[in-house]
Image (cartoon, grey):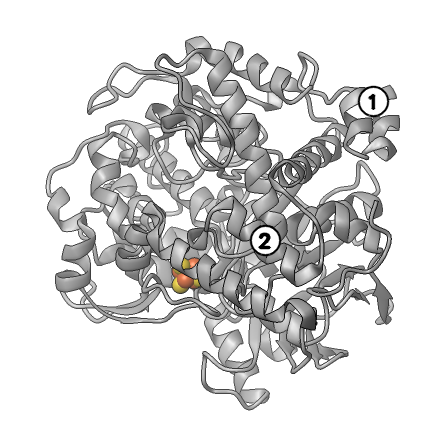
Amino acid sequence: MNKKFPKGGYLGKTLRVDLSSGKITEEMIDPKFLYQYIGGTGLGVRLLYDETIPGLDPYDPQNRIVIAVGPLTGTLVPGSGTYSINCRNTLTGLLTSAQANGFFGARLRYAGYDVLIIQGKSDTPVYLYINDGQATIEDASKLAGKGTFATDQWLRKKYGEADIDHHISVAAIGPAGENLVRFACVMNDRGHVAATGGVGAIMGSKGLKAIVVHGNQAIPVDPADSETFLENIRQWRDEAHNTGMGKSVGKKGTIGFYLNAHKKGWAPVKNLTTNVFSGTEKFDGDYIRKKAHKSLPRSCYQCTFTHCHAVQVTRGPYKGAIGEEVEYEILAGFGPNWGIYDPGTPTMLNTLNDDLGMDAKELTFLISMMMEGYEKGMIGKKELDGIALKWGDAEAAAEMMRRISRREGIGDLLAEGVKRSSDKLGGEFPSIAVYVKKGNAPHVHDPRSRWGTLFNQVVADTGSQEAVDYTARGSEDLAIEKPTAEPDEYLGEVNAKSAWWRQFQECLLYCYYQTASGETMIKTLNTLTGSDYDMAHALRIGKRVVNLMRMFNVREGMTKEHDSFSQRLGTPPVDGPAQGKSIAPTFERVLQAYYKMSNWDQEGVPTREILEELDLGFTIPVLGK
Ligand code: SF4
């Protein structure tokens, strides 16, 4: 066990802010944790586990928000502006972990910290200003009720930085977070979203409107290895441009996925009631970039891809609307999943949603459920407070979004998210709702024909964590060869290993689209930190994090029933390329193979042996309960 502080890569400091008492302190991070968890999500979850009192309501002031970055954050590694927020999940009551790209992670490091822990609750709205190793809690009463864009602008003006791409970063909540909408998000750097699990609602429950970071602290690099570190970064960058993801996302953005996804039956249409619609040519990434939008690349920290863009819609009903180029999931979710077939309309809806501060995954399946319910006569205009929520009606959807963000009228019920709302509405609603049983909506796909994707999200312990779907191809990094047939054991094995690998990546913490080979990423980490990780060790770290996440949830009362999906997700598609297919008949066998590969028992609980082997012995008392 490495007990010494790593040679490079870490500032080694946590900033702890107690919003109840106003006390702000600095603490050193235990180097043992850095070796065992590296940083980012792994480190954040470990600290959260240690500081969480089981059984508390997510909004209890005693709960923590743990924001963590990794050793590579803020270096020259491509896309290393990412950060990870870890806290209780307001939809599931279990764990959540949300990551966002942009600049915020890098600037938190420049401000002097690897970890930020927020606890307590302020009775009045406040924001946190962290500047070069100094932190203050400031009055945010002038920002109360403001959208995330206006909040960002106000804070930039106050701190003298009108230019978006330089020097300060703001992570803020909108009205949805202030009003404890259970799927409120945190928005940083105007357009980057820590989306999952209601992290914005937890910030809102603490009275924390925003966090501003700025500074000039240097990230230590071992001088003996600095040249090799730079050489490794160059290799990382080259490799990232040449992966399948780099060649597609790097050049065309994720909107370039849409047509292929639709062809394969992966793109959700009208709440999964169909898989087809006419006019798909307008959802081609090239068409959108050339004909539907004017756009300007706006990359994140140390990114050389032309993925993120600032755009203006050039045709259709929302000509002139501005915002960020939508991602594939938003294009699908605020487009065909709501019966909207104009490719510019999701841009207008996305800008509104980013400003209100809500997670698009939960929102799309919430509104699509209500649109289907309205069409089928399960709910009427009167119960919807006068809003005729018809398929394709963007104005009706926008008005409902505003009401949800204010928890106004029917918006108060819908602010509870898909599962809770469908349970409260009753009748046929639970049978048409799209969610995984822990209590959150999945990523915005029709995952019924993409079993790896569906399975990953069903067993995820943080709410819709999307791991790479290796079921389609196997992976050299994971030393898994794709068999000619697809036995259930293979699906279980590949999903377990891909979850470990994904969690290792979340410990390193970088933009997922910038992935290089495992070997290059690990040697880059080693030259920066002076460590001795190899592929087996990396997978072991990922496995440790997956097991710790599971033990967090077991401690909160999670059972095997939570590793499942809603009725709608178990039904076969009625048309399209995946017509008639469903994972439901084989799901239990795949699940048991996954548990077995993970060394978990048949109820999905880690065994004492695996917990000891992974240095998670401190969680074993939970097994006795
Ligand atoms: S690929 Fe996209 S999300 Fe990732 S760092 Fe680059 S611009 Fe940001």
Q: Nearer the viewer, mark 1 or mark 2?
A: 2
Q: Is residue 507 above or below residue 206?
A: above
Residue 369 placement (x, y as % from top left): 38, 34
Residue 98 placement (x, y as % from top left): 58, 50
Using the image as rendered, state which of residue 542 and residue 585 is in the foreground. 542
Identify the residue position indicated by label 1 in the image.
Answer: 623
Residue 110 placement (x, y as % from top left): 65, 76
Using the image as rendered, state which of residue 512 and residue 431 is in the foreground. 512
Q: Is residue 202 left or right of residue 351?
A: right
Q: Secondary structure at mark 1?
A: helix
Q: Is residue 440 left or right of residue 95?
A: left
Q: How many marks?
A: 2
Identify the residue position indicated by label 2 in the image.
Answer: 523
Q: Residue at x 79, y 28 (%)?
A: 613
Which numbered circle lies on residue 4?
none
Label 1 is placed on what type of residue? Answer: Leu
Using the image as rendered, state which of residue 178 and residue 551 is in the foreground. 551
Label 2 is placed on what type of residue? Answer: Lys
Residue 415 placement (x, y as % from top left): 52, 46
Quarter of the image with the N terminus in it: top right
Dot 1 and dot 2 residues touching (CB under 8 Å): no
Q: Residue at x 58, y 75 (%)?
A: 143
Q: Secondary structure at mark 2?
A: helix
* Mark pair 1, 2: CA separation: 37 Å
Q: Residue at x 68, y 76 (%)?
A: 111
Quarter of the image with the C terminus in it: top right
- Mark 1 vs mark 2: which is more N-terminal? 2
Q: Residue at x 49, y 70 (%)?
A: 189
